[in-house]
Amino acid sequence: MSMRKIDLDDPTVASVTILGDVVDSTDDNVDLLAHLRVGRVLGFTAFTLRNIERLMSSDHLAWFVSPGMLVVNQLTDDVILGAVRDAVALGLGVVQRED
């Protein structure tokens, strides 16, 4: 699994680590770690809507839940970073580490 860190010039989020590779930016999901400037690390998973639809239809699911879930229209750096910033501002995310 690949790992890629994006440093940010943001007062709250120092960097975002993307865990894994995006195969299809419109039908995939990827795990993320948001490293906050206060030392806390929050976990998220970004899903495209098409990916959720495909997972639900192929597994015949009646619902779909995931802690730290972000729903995006495409898995590009700009969209991922925007979603993470908004989620952090709303106090969302799964705590991975607190310093």
Image (cartoon, rainbow, N blue to C red):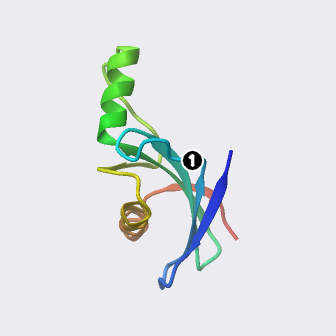
Residue in the foreground of this view, choosing between 96 and 72: 72
Residue at 35% from the left image edge and 67% from the top image edge: 86
Query: Can residue 61 be seen by looking at this rendering?
Result: no
Residue in the foreground of this view, choosing between 81 and 38: 81
Check disc 1: other Cα within 10 Å, few if <14, some if 14-19, many if 20+: some
Give left or right: position of 90 versus 32.
Answer: left
Q: Quadrant of the N terminus?
A: top right
Residue 76 x, y percent position in the rendering: 41, 58
Residue at 65% from the left image edge and 74% from the top image edge: 39
Residue at 60% from the left image edge and 78% from the top image edge: 38
Secondary structure under tag 1 reads loop
Residue 42 x, y percent position in the rendering: 56, 60
* Quarter of the image where one finds residue 52: top left
Give left or right: position of 6 versus 3.
Answer: left
Query: Can residue 52 be seen by looking at this rendering?
Result: yes
Give left or right: position of 16 versus 28.
Answer: right
Where is 25 relative to 85, above or below?
A: above
Where is 99 relative to 25, above or below?
A: below
Q: Which residue is mark 1?
A: 21
Residue in the foreground of this view, choosing between 98 and 11: 11
Query: Type of residue at label 1?
Result: Asp
Residue 36 x, y percent position in the rendering: 57, 73
Where is 56 relative to 98, above or below?
A: above
- Residue sitting at the far front: 23
Residue at 37% from the left image edge and 35% from the top image edge: 51
